[in-house]
Image (spheres, grey):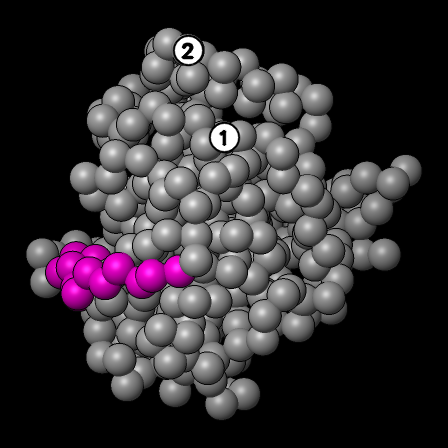
Amino acid sequence: YISLSLSISHKSSRIVWWGLKNGRNAVMATFEMTPTDSEAPRKVDESCTVDTLSLAMAGETVKVDTKYGPITVTVCGDAKKPALLTCHDIGLNHRSCFQGLFMCAGPESRLLKNFCVYHIDLPGHEENATEVPAELLPVTVDKLSDMVDKVMKHFEISECMGLGVGYGAYVLTKYATTFPGMVGLIAVTPLYNKPGWHEWGNLKAATYQLWYGGLSNWVREYIISRLVHNGMMNQASDLTQAYRKDLSARPPRVLMHYLQAAMTRSGLQAASLKSQVLMFVGDKSPFKEESLDMNTSIASHGALVLIDGAGTVTTEERPQEMINPIDLFLQRLEQQGFGV
């Protein structure tokens, strides 16, 4: 069983054929292609202006009541347009997870021009949050996907696009396999399998420390290692510094509950997923292998883009390399009548 994926580097595109070898994902062949001027991808809008950020991130904040407590949604754009739901990774929020991507896309991109964006902040991750609602404990993907469904019903959305990163992509994938209505899904390095022993051990140690001692340096660096690749952590980049600051301000018990949810997660069954899927995978992410497992399950209606030298949150590490594949993906959905 072989599927075609596209890996993008700074100066060329690398076509990668993935397949199963001895029961594991393996590279079967690679082909390097350097585009000519006439074949070069559309230039990304680099005018990261305040207007673009306002259009993509600053909107009406709505608290949607559910049986598991309220969930905060930031609505950006014209509600008459098709809906795009976003869901961030653990320890982040919609701004720290997606503003790089939307600013690089620019106001004339399909991502912003064609959609009304509904940014979902997982309970406890919203601005000035102090705790996770008691009704949501223990946090599970089933409860969170049910909350996503309540968001859809609250805003009277019958069809939507999804954009999720890491655990947020796991939640949206679970939603798409359980509820109808998600036409397309952009999954960025999604969690897919239950944790292996190494990840489980780290999560167990992290949740123990968060419960008894708060956010230690080790726990903070472990969470960041789930988000960005080690090279960026070692370089003390602006992104990792911002993440360190954000995590230090977040209530330790909130982080503990979500790391516990990641520790106890079950594997998904994406074979039943009917949505069209565009998957981005950072090739330095600790979740690369399980993201590739998901790609194997949905290869008949999914496309994979490998991002060289990136960790999990490619929306912030390498957003400029996501714009053209997203544009082509949305163009394909337009041809099917969605997002026009």
Location of residue 261 in the rendering, given as x and y in whole percent from the top left corner: 54, 36
First in sequence, mark 1 or 2: give its number: 2
Cα distance between the residues tagged 1 and 2: 15 Å
Q: Determine whether 90 is above or below 71 in the image.
A: above
Label 1 sits on what residue type?
Answer: Leu
Observer able to see residue 202:
yes
Instruction: Give the crowd class for mark 1: few <14, some 14-19, many >=20 residues within 10 Å.
Output: many
Q: Residue at x 23, y 63 (%)?
A: 62
Label 2 sits on what residue type?
Answer: Tyr
Instruction: In the rendered structure, find residue 259 and report the number of the disc placed on it.
Output: 1
* The furthest residue to the right: 22
Q: Determine whether 220 is above or below 176 in the image.
A: above
Q: Determine whether 133 is above or below 275 in the image.
A: above
Which region shows up in magenta?
52-66
The N terminus - image quarter: bottom right
* Residue 53 magenta-highlighted: yes
Residue marked by disc 2: 212
Q: Residue at x 46, y 82 (%)?
A: 158
The C terminus - image quarter: bottom left
Instruction: Report which quarter residue 48 is drawn in.
Output: bottom left
